[in-house]
């Protein structure tokens, strides 16, 4: 009798088995976001003073592209782009490195608080180092004449090698950043 029931039990077991869902392959992992590598840049910002000093920003890429934004007391307000020789931009970057720019502190005062501020920023391999000379919030800091001289010299070099004077000088007597030096 057991043998006669066995096919019947097996038939019932198969008839009530839950349906087996097909095995879905795992969803593919999302592709990693592309890594955006910021290009190496040097930026010079000249800020307002108590008088009429040019207020502008220059950004130089290693390949020689220059981006200018004239804000006030400049010959040309607004944005301009041009290219300098790659040797000039390479020289600028090497001068910042040779001068030990990355060892400078973040802020330094100037002799006279009413002088315009100068902000230099170096972006290299994703590391950003920003140095401010003069301007708001620096009057209470101790003076460092070596740092002042170095920052002024580097800022002047940026202006000269980018030929920014054509956009910053309102007349032939006034040089770009001349009220700083």
Image: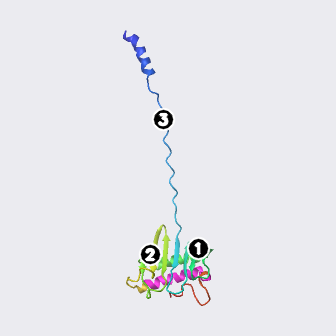
Going by the image, does 21 lie left or right of 66?
left
Per the image, label 3 sits on a secondary structure element best described as loop
Coloration of the structure image: rainbow
Q: Position of residue 63 (x, y in %)?
A: 58, 71
Contact between labelled residues 1 and 2, with CB atoms less than 8 Å apart = no
Q: Position of residue 37 (x, y in %)?
A: 52, 63
Q: Position of residue 127 (x, y in %)?
A: 46, 68
Label at residue 102: 2
Going by the image, does 57 lie left or right of 4?
right
The residue indicated by pointer 1 is 67
Range covered by the magenta-colored residues: 147-166
Of pointers 3 and 2, the one earlier in the residue sequence: 3
Per the image, label 1 sits on a secondary structure element best described as strand
Along the line of sight, the residue nearer the viewer: 147 or 52? 52
Q: Is residue 163 magenta?
A: yes
Going by the image, does 181 lie left or right of 3?
right
The residue indicated by pointer 3 is 23
> Dot 1: within a 10 Å radius of its alpha carbon, few (fewer than 14), some, or many (20 or more) residues?
some
Q: Is residue 145 magenta?
A: no
Disc 3 to disc 1, C-alpha distance:
57 Å
> Dot 3: within a 10 Å radius of its alpha carbon, few (fewer than 14), some, or many (20 or more) residues?
few
Residue at screen point 49% across, 71% down: 123
Extreme-front residue of the structure:
50
């Amino acid at each position: 009798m057991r043998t006669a029931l066995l096919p019947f039990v097996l038939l019932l077991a198969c008839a009530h088995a839950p349906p087996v869902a097909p095995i879905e392959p795992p969803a593919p992992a999302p592709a990693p976001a592309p890594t955006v590598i910021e290009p190496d840049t040097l930026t010079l910002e000249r800020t307002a003073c108590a008088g009429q000093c040019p207020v502008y920003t220059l950004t130089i890429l290693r390949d020689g592209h220059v981006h200018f934004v004239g804000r006030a007391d400049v010959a040309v307000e607004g944005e301009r782009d041009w290219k300098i020789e790659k040797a000039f931009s390479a020289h600028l970057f090497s001068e910042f490195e040779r001068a030990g720019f990355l060892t400078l502190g973040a802020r330094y005062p100037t002799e006279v608080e009413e002088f315009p501020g100068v902000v230099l920023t170096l972006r290299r391999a994703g590391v950003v180092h920003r140095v401010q000379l003069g301007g708001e919030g620096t009057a209470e800091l101790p003076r460092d004449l070596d740092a002042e001289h170095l920052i002024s010299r580097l800022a002047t070099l940026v202006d000269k090698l980018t030929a920014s004077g054509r956009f910053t000088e309102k007349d032939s007597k006034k040089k770009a950043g001349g009220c700083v030096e």
